[in-house]
Image: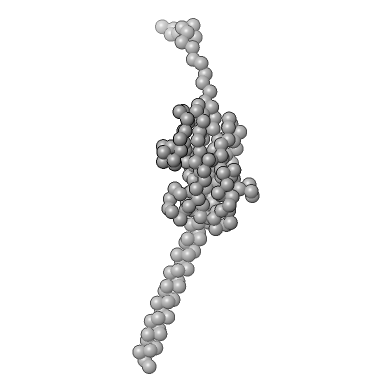
Amino acid sequence: MLKLKSKRKRLLYVSGLITVAGLLVGAKAIHFISRSQAISDCPASVAGQAMAAADSKLHPLKVVVEPWEGRHNVYGVFVIPKGHRSDRFVTITFDDRQTYCGSIVPVDPSWVNMKVQPGQQVVLGLLRTRTAIWLLTNGKKSQLEQPASWTLSTQKPTYSRVSNSAAEMPTSTH
């Protein structure tokens, strides 16, 4: 009978340790995922400034939402028109007006099985995996998969004409 009590005590002790460890790991995971909202929020000044200055606002031709495949598996595929340059970030906006930012990475068109016209550029708008998981756990999957939720602002560069005229060149007083 004494051995049975000893085994029970060990079993209770080990199961208690496992429970405490699970609670600590779970609390850390919840804290990490809940922080992702703040990590991927767009600064209001930057997002508003980019949208106001944009010549065109593009939506992706394709959206991939597969965060379970690892990093960089939540993205939109954009084609930037010839003569345009893109912002450094993509915005993902939901019905509740919450906007998240992702980074832009140029890729070879063959990597995403696309053919583009000369001068066009293919870029991926990457959303952080932890942010995507947070959004999925909050019921935003269908909105995240919609190309209309993703926006990439582009501008056509403006060039100022520089004159080489000697009359406009500063002169030395020496």
Residue at (43, 69) in percent of width and height: 21
Q: Residue furthest bottom?
A: 1
> Percent x, y for residue 53?
58, 31
Q: Residue at x 64, y 48 (%)?
A: 95
State the residue lying farthest toward the right: 96
Q: Is residue 30 above or below residue 118?
A: below
Tell me if I can see residue 143 in this picture.
yes
How far across and down, in percent of the image, does residue 40 sit?
Answer: 52, 47
Q: From what the image shows, is residue 104 above or below residue 17?
A: above
User: Which of the image's four quarters has the C terminus?
Assistant: top left
Residue 66 appears at what percent x and percent y? 48, 52
Q: Residue at x 45, y 65 (%)?
A: 25
- Would you say residue 90 is visible in this rendering? no
In the rendered picture of this protein, how many numbered marks are placed on residues? 0
Query: In front here: 72 or 167?
Result: 72
Q: Residue at 56% x, 36% y: name it.
A: 58
Q: Residue furthest left?
A: 3
